[in-house]
Image (cartoon, rainbow, N blue to C red):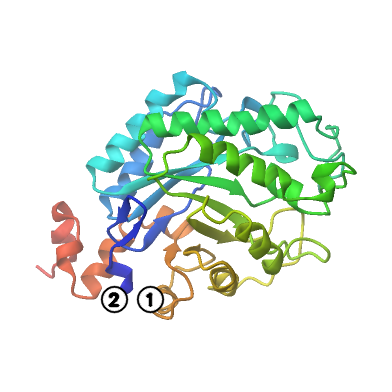
Amino acid sequence: MKLFKPLTIKNMTLKNRLVMPPMCMYSAINQDGMVTPFHIAHYTARAIGQVGLIIVEATGVTPQGRISNECLGLYDDDQIAGMQQVVDNVHYAGSKVALQLNHAGRKSQTDTFPHLAPSAVCYNHYAVNYDEMTQAQINEVVEAFAQAARRADEAGFDGLEIHAAHGYLIHQFLSPLANQRSDAYGQDRSLFLNQVVDAVHSVWPREKPLWLRISATDWLEGSVAVPDWCGFINGLKGKIDMVHVSSGALQKADVHVYPGYMLPLAQGIQAGTGLPTISVGLLSDEQLIINALEDDRCTLVALGRELLRSPNKLCELAAQYGRMDLVTKAYERAYLEK
């Protein structure tokens, strides 16, 4: 069964195909972007539960690049030590761990200003409190991604994910609904993405995997969709190693949600790029998980809310399918009849 089979991407070997996707915990309680004991316990618990790959939540590359005041950041060398504690604890429990780097752009709710956006275009019903980014501001953010990637490597992360989804800054540049610039960044909406990837690629070790989180569709007329993304990604060949496929959140949209509703998106990206994919989207049903992997609709499955509810999901599935050898040793008695 593929769920329990290892997978190697560059020098990162995952012991199974289950992923914990990045989910904001809003728990940097001192509003300084620093790791707290909560983060260490939270991520280590899923590693003890045998999750193959754990992706740490959206981490701001600048103070205003955080989604909220309580989100993690990696814009200061003083933040490396806390991240290293997370890495060391996850490694101790036997899992691999990656970090998602992000700039929230116009969706930032921090008290740190100025908030940034490619264009002064309204996001849903919120007031426009940002101007079109200057070239200097663009350059600063690109460099901030590179410096955060350097810090992530120093902290020991096994992989790195660039957040280009969910309506955050990179996604804003990609969509004509958010990017209405008349300069080079408007003429080639993938330019900012390419510059960020190039900057990160220049400092991130070649032997470690680097990948993107994308919104393969915005569920909106006139915005980006799977064919656009295949073009963007194919332009980055040799620089990224995988695609984490999500959808939406550029702005409000009507979405028909059902278990596995994003699997066709992952399948389309995989077919159009030839890269391995992580799929998400209400995949808690065990048969859906197994079928998605066995039918090669994706390479890895990510369970978000399900892993918040059930940190030991992999152990449960392993015991159910006769693989007690994969159950955390200390927890074996929980899966035995007597």
Task: From the viewer's side, name the closer residue of 187 and 156.
Answer: 187
In the rendered view, tell whether residue 196 sits above or below residue 1.
Answer: above
Q: Earlier in the sequence, mark 1 or mark 2?
A: 2
Could you tell me residue 193's position as x and y percent?
67, 46
Amino acid on which disc 2 is placed: Met
Residue 14 seen in render: yes
Q: Residues within 10 Å of mark 2 (few under 14, many from 20)?
A: few
Q: What residue is pinned by disc 1? A: 290
Q: Residue at x 67, y 67 (%)?
A: 226
Seen in the image, is 122 located left or right of residue 337? right
Task: From the viewer's side, name the closer residue of 295 and 28.
Answer: 295
Could you tell me residue 77's position as x and y percent?
47, 20
Q: Residue at x 69, y 54 (%)?
A: 249
Seen in the image, is 261 located left or right of residue 184? left
Q: Residue at x 42, y 43 (%)?
A: 206
Q: Which secondary structure, mark 1?
A: helix
Amino acid on which disc 1 is placed: Ile
The image quadrant where one finds the C terminus is bottom left
Residue positioned most to the right: 182
Task: From the viewer's side, name the closer residue of 320 and 53.
Answer: 53
Q: Which secondary structure, mark 2?
A: loop
Residue positioned most to the left: 338
The image quadrant where one finds the N terminus is bottom left
In the rendered view, tell whether residue 227 sits above or below residue 79.
Answer: below
Q: Residues within 10 Å of mark 1 (few under 14, many from 20)?
A: some
Could you tell me residue 145's position as x and y percent?
58, 34
| Marker count (numbered) | 2
Give the distance between the C-alpha atoms of the residues marked 1 and 2, in whole angstroms: 8 Å
Q: Residue at x 68, y 27 (%)?
A: 140
Q: What residue is pinned by disc 2? A: 1
| Rendered image quadrant of residue 301 | bottom left
